[in-house]
Amino acid sequence: MEPLKKALHKLLFPGKAVVLLSVLLSAFLLAYTFSSDTQHASPVAYIAYLVSAYSLTVVCTNGFLLFRKGAGFARQNVWVNRYITDVPFRVHISLYLSLAINILYAVIKFISGVHYRSLWLVSIAVYYGLLALMRFLLLWRESPQSIEKNRRSALRRYRFCGIILLLMNQALAVIVLLIVQQNRRYEYPGTLIYLMAAYAFYSIIIATKNFIKYRKHHSPILAAAKAINLAAALVSILSLETAMLARFGSPKDAAFQQQMVAATGGFICVVILGMAVSMIVRSSKEIKNSRSSYTV
C-alpha cells in the first residue's frame, strides 16, 4: 500500500519542471488537434485530451499546495495574521470594504439613471445609498476593539439599522408593485448589465460566506452587517432579474415574466420585512433586559 501512495504522490506532484512541460505539451497538442483536418478522430486527439487532463490535474494540485505555502508566508505579516485571527478587526475591515464597494455601485447606478433618465436606476441607487449609510453608522466612532465591548451602543445601532431597513422595505414594495402593475421592464444599456451581474454574484457570495463563517458569533454589529449584506444581495438579484428579462426575454412571455418579477419581489420584501422586525424586536428586548439588570 505504501509504494502505491508514493507512486500516486509522485504522479500528482512531479515537480515544477514536469508541470510546466505538461502545460506546454498539452497546449501544443490541443492547438494541433483543433487546427487539424482530422480533428477529433486522430490518435493525436486522444493523446492531447489525456495530456491536457493530466496537466490540469497537476496544475490544480500543485496550485493548491502553492496557495497553502503562500498563505503560511503571508501569515507572518502582522496585519495579515491579525486579519485572519482577530474577528472584530476582520469585521471592521470587511465593513469598510463593503462600504466602499456599496458607494461606488450606488454612484454608478445614480449617474447611469440620470444619464439614461431611468427612474428605476435612480431608485435602486438611492436604496444602495441608504445601505451605505447604514454601514457608515455601524463604523462611526467604532474601533475594532469597541465592536465587542460596548454592547448596549451596538444594540442601539442594530435596532436603528432594523428601523431603516423596515422603512426602506416599504419603498421597495411600492417599486415592485409599480413594476408588476405597469408591466415595465428596465433594460440596462451597454455593458452595464454585466457590471450588475458581477455585483449581484459578489453580493450573494459575500452574504453566504459571512452567514456561514460568523453564524456562531453574537455581536450586534456583526449581525447588522450580515443583515445589510443579505438585503443588498436580495435586491441585486431582483435588479438583475428585471435586466435579464428585459434583455433576453420574449414579448410572448410577458405574462410569465410579470409573474416571475412579482414572485421574486414579493419573496424579497417578505424576507427583508421579517429580518427588519426581528432586528428591532430582539435588540429592544435585550436593551430592556440590560436596563432591568442594571437597575437591580
Image (cartoon, helix red, strand yellow):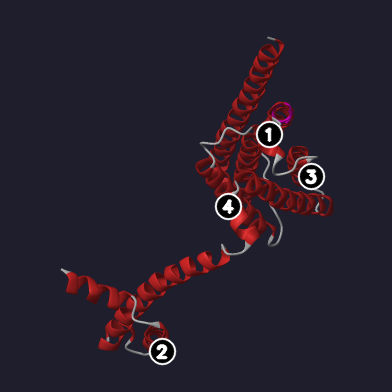
Which residue lies under the disc numbered 3?
A: 122
Which residue lies under the disc numbered 1?
A: 149
User: Which kind of residue does numbered mark 2 sit on?
Assistant: Phe
Q: Is residue 36 above or below residue 274?
A: below
Q: Is residue 65 left or right of residue 135?
A: left
Mark 3 vs mark 4: in front: 4
Which residue lies under the disc numbered 2?
A: 28
Please provide percent x and percent y for residue 31: 42, 87
**Label 1 crowding class (10 Å Cα cut-off): few <14, some 14-19, many 20+?**
few
Please provide percent x and percent y for residue 97: 70, 52
What is the CA distance from the residue labelled 1 to the residue labelled 2? Answer: 60 Å
What is the CA distance from the residue labelled 1 to the residue labelled 4? Answer: 33 Å
First in sequence: mark 1 or mark 3?
3
Q: Quadrant of residue 210?
A: top right
Q: Is residue 214 above or below residue 16?
A: above
Mark 1 vs mark 4: in front: 1
* Magenta region includes residue 178: no
Query: Camera-side residue: 62 or 239?
Result: 62
First in sequence: mark 1 or mark 2?
2
First in sequence: mark 3 or mark 4?
3
Q: Is residue 149 left or right of residue 119?
A: left
First in sequence: mark 4 or mark 2?
2
What is the CA distance from the residue labelled 4 to the residue labelled 2? Answer: 35 Å
Label number found at residue 201: 4
What is the CA distance from the residue labelled 3 to the residue labelled 4? Answer: 21 Å
User: Which kind of residue does numbered mark 4 sit on?
Assistant: Phe
**Which residue is at the far left?**
1
**Label 2 crowding class (10 Å Cα cut-off): few <14, some 14-19, many 20+?**
few
Q: Is residue 123 left or right of residue 286?
A: right
- Asked whether disc 2 touches disc 3, contact meaning CB atoms under 8 Å apart, the reply is no
Can residue 273 be seen here? yes
First in sequence: mark 1 or mark 4?
1
